[in-house]
Image: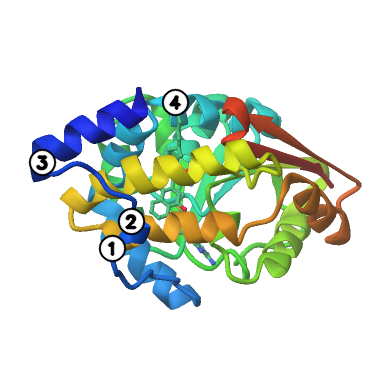
Amino acid sequence: MAALLGIVSTVAFTGQLPVNSRSRRRMVVKCSNSNDRQILFNRIAPVYDNLNDLLSLGQHRIWKNMAVSWSGAKKGDHVLDLCCGSGDLAFILSEKVGSTGKVMGLDFSCEQLAVASSRQNLRARSCYKCIEWIEGDATDLPFDDCKFDAITMGYGLRNIVDRDRGMREIYRVLKPGSRVSILDFNKSNQSVTAFMQDWMIDNVVVPVATVYGLAKEYEYLKYSINGYLTGEELETLALEAGFSSARHYEISGGFMGNLVAVR
Ligand SMILES: C/C(=C\Cc1cc(O)c2ccccc2c1O)CCC[C@H](C)CCC[C@H](C)CCCC(C)C
Ligand SMILES: C[S@@+](CC[C@H](N)C(=O)[O-])C[C@H]1O[C@@H](n2cnc3c(N)ncnc32)[C@H](O)[C@@H]1O
């Protein structure tokens, strides 16, 4: 269905059938440093939410709700959404903790935070007022030790250059016994799943992004997934950062995965 959608939308927009992006000579944006990634996420901020809805057929909202549930966030908690982007998980967290709780959304993309703040202003429920947006770096958090009752990170860890440091910062600011829930693409050990994920990105995601002039930004997606950690490696990363337990759950047929670690 997603592939058909991409083909139809590509033909509709470009008049051409999608081709494997490997067949066209194109410089792949590797975004090897944080500044490149800041620029990338600032650039895609205006269309990020709409493309996520279109390209995942709205499924990403289900995955994000699962990630927040796995965090254990509850009424009255003080929680953090790291790499919050346009705020999807922060809004879900605020519904969990309610107006007596507190949500902080941190990101280093000012454009993503601007979208998050605009979305917050359009929402009337009192729980959304408890969200504070902070421009900062996930590898150098401006928070005291043992501050948060739960932390979420949706599609962020894969984009952090120094992941070890990022995981250690999460450990530092979490209260003992509390959880972090980290949602991202799954770097599958199953060759069929990995092939299908690559195929979808090459033949649906990038062609649709091309319509918006963002081909290189979305080609980075495939590069970043290929350079990500497997579920087992993510569990090891968490344990080496000091977490007492860590489990990685594959979801959506192995396309996505969620790491849950307890301090
Ligand atoms: C919410 C999602 C991705 C967020 C995201 C993360 C990144 O690191 C990016 C980097 C560069 C550009 C964009 C992003 C980005 O949007 C996941 C859903 C949106 C995806 C773009 C769609 C991926 C499609 C899957 C490969 C197949 C989905 C199958 C589904 C069962 C329909
Ligand atoms: C794919 S978006 C995810 C946004 C949101 N969590 C979601 O699930 O839709 C990744 C976000 O991570 C942010 N990011 C990447 N590296 C970061 C870092 N070192 N510190 C803070 N934010 C970072 C980017 O600016 C971007 O907004």
Residue at (10% x, 41% y) in the render: 13
Among numbered discs 2 and 3, the one appearing first in the sequence: 3
Tell me which amino acid carries mark 1.
Arg
From the viewer's perspective, is 37 left or right of 163?
left
Q: Dot 2: within a 10 Å radius of its alpha carbon, few (fewer than 14), some, or many (20 or more) residues?
A: some
Near mark 1 (Cα within 10 A), the count class, few <14, some 14-19 or many ≥20, is few
Does the CB distance between marks 2 and 3 fall below 8 Å? Answer: no
Write the residue at 66% across / 43% down.
Answer: 188
- Circle 4 sits on which residue? 59
Q: Secondary structure at mark 1?
A: loop
Quadrant where the N terminus lies?
A: top left
Instruction: Give coordinates of residue 144: x percent, y percent.
Output: 70, 62
- Identity of the amino acid at label 2? Ser
Residue 33: % across, % down:
50, 77
Q: CA distance from mark 2 to mark 3?
A: 17 Å
Label 3 Cα crowd, 10 Å radius (few <14 / some 14-19 / many 20+): some
According to the image, label 3 marks what residue? 13
Alpha-carbon span between mark 3 and mark 1: 18 Å
Residue 144 position (above or below residue 75): below
- Between disc 2 and disc 3, the foreground one is 2
Indicate left or right for 175 with 161 as reference: right
In the rendering, at what x and y percent does residue 237 appear?
A: 79, 58
Q: Residue at x 34, y 70 (%)?
A: 39
Mark nearest the camera among 4 and 3 is: 3
Residue contact at pointers 3 and 1, CB within 8 angstroms: no
- SS at circle 3: helix
In the rendered view, would you say 256 is above or below 263?
Answer: above
What residue did someone put label 2 on? 21
Q: Which residue is mark 1?
A: 24
Q: How many marks?
A: 4
Asked if the residue at tag 2 contacts the one at tag 1, i.e. Cβ–Cβ closer than 8 Å, the answer is yes
